Amino acid sequence: MGRVTVTEGRIGDDWAALLIRVRDDRDEAAFAALFRHFAPRVKGFLMKSGASAALAEDCAQDVMAVLWNKAHLFDPARASVATWVFTIARNRRIDALRKARRPEPEDLPWGPEAEPDQQAALEMQQDTERLGEAIARLPEKQRVLIERAYFGDLSHTEIAAETGLPLGTIKSRIRLALERLRHKMG
């Protein structure tokens, strides 16, 4: 297995050819060429999307392991190598964010919790009802975004991707909705 070079003229075709060699022949030199090219780009992509350098490095390594282990899933008729690799990277980033939001088992409380006093429970129930009514009275465009962000547990970026709205619009509408809710609840 010799050193693999990629010619500048047909890079997209060459990446696909290299990945097909990994897929069909488990060609380590082809994988090394793909790794040299894509690993630093994936890490940079993840860091630009807000990941720490350590998390981006871990995700990039994971993406490259997926490239090696699941090369048989690559279909050049459906996507370019870059599209396939960066889709895997995006999905790994989403998985890492979801994992970070979940408490570790050792952080979960164990045993019976103290009973809240009746007055506190009644106040919490009334606040919850007032909040529900205030959310229901928001303009629909704001209400839907608040529900997706806080009850659907989606990030602003995920909401933008889901709705097709610009990220700035998502943030503005949520900010305005929160200001209205603060006013109603205050």
Image (spheres, helix red, strand yellow):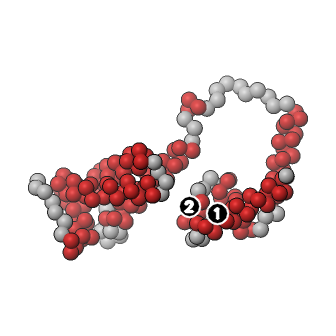
Secondary-structure class at tag 2: helix
Question: Do we see residue 115 in this rendering?
Answer: yes
Q: Residue at x 21, y 75 (%)?
A: 9
Question: In the picture provided, is 162 more to the left or to the right than 174?
Answer: left
Q: In the displayed orientation, state which residue is furthest to the bottom.
A: 9
Q: Residue at x 47, y 51 (%)?
A: 51
Q: Can you tell which mark lies on residue 28?
A: none
User: Tag 1 or tag 2, which sits nearer the N-term?
Assistant: 2
The disc labelled 1 sits on which kind of residue? Lys
Q: Is residue 54 above or below residue 85?
A: above
Viewer-proximal residue among 161 and 44: 44
Question: In the picture provided, is 126 more to the left or to the right than 52?
Answer: right
Q: Quadrant of residue 140?
A: bottom right
Q: Is residue 23 above or below residue 13?
A: above
How far apart marks 2 and 1 lie (CA) works out to 9 Å
Q: In the displayed orientation, state which residue is furthest to the top.
A: 111
Q: Quadrant of residue 89?
A: bottom left
Q: Residue at x 53, y 44 (%)?
A: 100
Give x and y (percent) for residue 91: 45, 55
| Structural crowding at the residue carrying mark 2, measured as other residues with C-alpha within 10 Å and reported as few (<14), some (14–19) or many (≥20) | some
Question: In the picture provided, is 12 more to the left or to the right than 126?
Answer: left
In front of the other: label 2 or label 1? 1
Q: Residue tagged by mark 2?
A: 157
Question: In the picture provided, is 44 more to the left or to the right than 49?
Answer: left
Q: Residue at x 76, y 26 (%)?
A: 114
Give x and y (percent) for residue 143: 73, 63
Give x and y (percent) for residue 97: 52, 49
| Structural crowding at the residue carrying mark 1, measured as other residues with C-alpha within 10 Å and reported as few (<14), some (14–19) or many (≥20) | some
Give x and y (percent) for residue 53: 41, 48
Is the C-beta separation of discs 2 and 1 under 8 Å? no
Secondary-structure class at tag 1: helix
Q: Residue tagged by mark 1?
A: 171
